[in-house]
Image (spheres, rainbow, N blue to C red):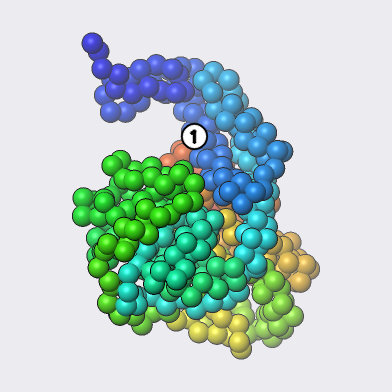
Amino acid sequence: MERLDMFCYQCSQTVKGTGCTVRGVCGKEPTVARLQDNLLLTTKGMSAYLYHARELGYTDNKINSFVERAFYSTFTQVNYDAENLVRLALEAGENNIKAMRLLKSAHIKAYGESEPTKVQTGTVKGRGIIVTGHGLKALEELLKQTEGTEINVYTHSEILPAHGYPGLKKYKHLVGNLGKAWFDQRKLFTEYPVAILATSNCALIPKEEYKDRIFTTGPVRLPGVKHIDGYDFRAIIEKSKSLPELEEKTEDVVLTTGFSKSVILSLADKLKKLVEGGKIRHFFLVGGCDSPVGRGEYYREFVMLLPSDTVVLTLACGKFRFNDLALGEIEGIPRLIDLGQCNDSIVAIEVVSALTELFEVGVNELPLSLVLSWTEQKAVAVLWSLLSLGIKGIYLGPIIPAWVNDDILKVLKANYDIRLIGEPKEDIKAMLA
Ligand code: FSO
């Protein structure tokens, strides 16, 4: 029987070989197909935020009905209209703002508003569980169930901002953070012989070395890995107890996370004075999803080269490229401000909107530049949110998003002045000019 090598969902044809060669043959222009891909990615990103909000009991039917419409618009032979697909992407961006707001408010209602918190890296003596992903609800349930067991809980990657929430930091056995962005996990999880809980996307297929001590929950499934339905974590706690203790080995790097909208707004008058007095020249929002491909080190070089009269706001796992740097302060204002997870882009949006009021200028006249990384998954939803707000001149990298072809790039450049990252030094010069 002939093997089905690939099914093209754009044209409903099966294709032999490793790549689709028929795009365009079905009557859809490749650009239309790519805009459909973009809409799929954007809606997928938004769905992740909706999932975590629903876990905490919050949902919004208007956003859900948009998600249905957006997915339906990516059906075979339903929408060939490139302009309409761009409009849908902008609408997805607007809905993603609502989804992020829903999730932020769910997090605040459940755990209080986060506060700047120092997070130790390295290990403390005792048994441990590493939690990776974005799922605060899963982390909370694990913290409750491990209380008094002498098991220490560590965050990894995007769940680092959990340390800032009063309702989570109250657990003394939430002891620190291990590792950086999501793609170091195969090395990290091999290095630390403890149990691991994966709570969301960005879980990698495990190595044999730790396959028997990693567990998944929520939407995550990994081949040959035990899955925990609901929030009964007895199996992972038992596993952790059967594993050796970690040695006391704290590292020198102490991370700071948990800057909330309220904290930033409480600094508004001071920020205004510092900007007007020439002490703060420019703000940068540097963040997004970290990519193992392309020139990811650009973001570290970029932040390191910034002049000392600038402030960096950051969020999502892209910050692990540089959040160990000691950038110091400008008259009490930290030069590196971690706003949280990728969904906390809503905090960045609200802070930017507050800055426009504070300085009485439009968003594109603010002394602010945005430098985003890897706009393929949730970050693509965030990108369209920013574009839907009319923000121009955003820098993208470290690779061109996969859904962008030359025609789409032309439109993004013409309508939104989208730029691609180049050399950090030259980019900084252009942004400050
Ligand atoms: Fe990073 Fe992953 Fe959260 Fe993304 S851990 S890469 S799609 O999830 O958004 O920042």
User: Residue at horizontal 25%, vertical 13%?
Assistant: 2
- Side of 318 where 14 appears, left or right: left
Q: Nearer the viewer, residue 400 or 56?
A: 56
Q: Relative to 321, is 290 above or below?
A: above
Q: Residue furthest left?
A: 209
Q: Nearer the viewer, residue 393 or 379?
A: 379
- Side of 276 where 74 appears, left or right: left
Q: Residue furthest top?
A: 1
- Side of 41 where 248 appears, left or right: left
The answer to whether residue 284 is visible is no
Could you classify mark 1 by the number of other residues whose Cα lies within 10 Å: few (under 14), some (14-19), or many (20 or more)?
some
The answer to whether residue 267 is visible is yes
Q: Position of residue 288 (x, y in %)?
A: 49, 57
Q: Position of residue 376 (x, y in %)?
A: 46, 46
Q: Nearer the viewer, residue 224 or 396?
A: 224
User: Residue at horizontal 58%, vertical 20%?
Assistant: 78
Residue 75, quarter of picture: top right
Q: Position of residue 57 (x, y in %)?
A: 65, 49
User: Residue at horizontal 39%, vertical 79%?
Assistant: 253
Q: Relative to 223, is 202 above or below?
A: below
* Residue that label 1 marks: 37
**Quadrant of the image for the N terminus?**
top left
Q: Relative to 217, is 288 above or below?
A: below
Residue 368, quarter of picture: bottom right
**Quadrant of the image for the C terminus?**
bottom right
Q: Nearer the viewer, residue 261 or 392?
A: 261
User: Residue at horizontal 32%, vertical 77%?
Assistant: 125
Q: Amino acid at mark 1?
A: Asp
Mark 1 close to ligand 1, CB under 8 Å: no
Which secondary structure, mark 1?
A: helix
Q: Position of residue 103 (x, y in %)?
A: 63, 53
* Tally of numbered discs: 1
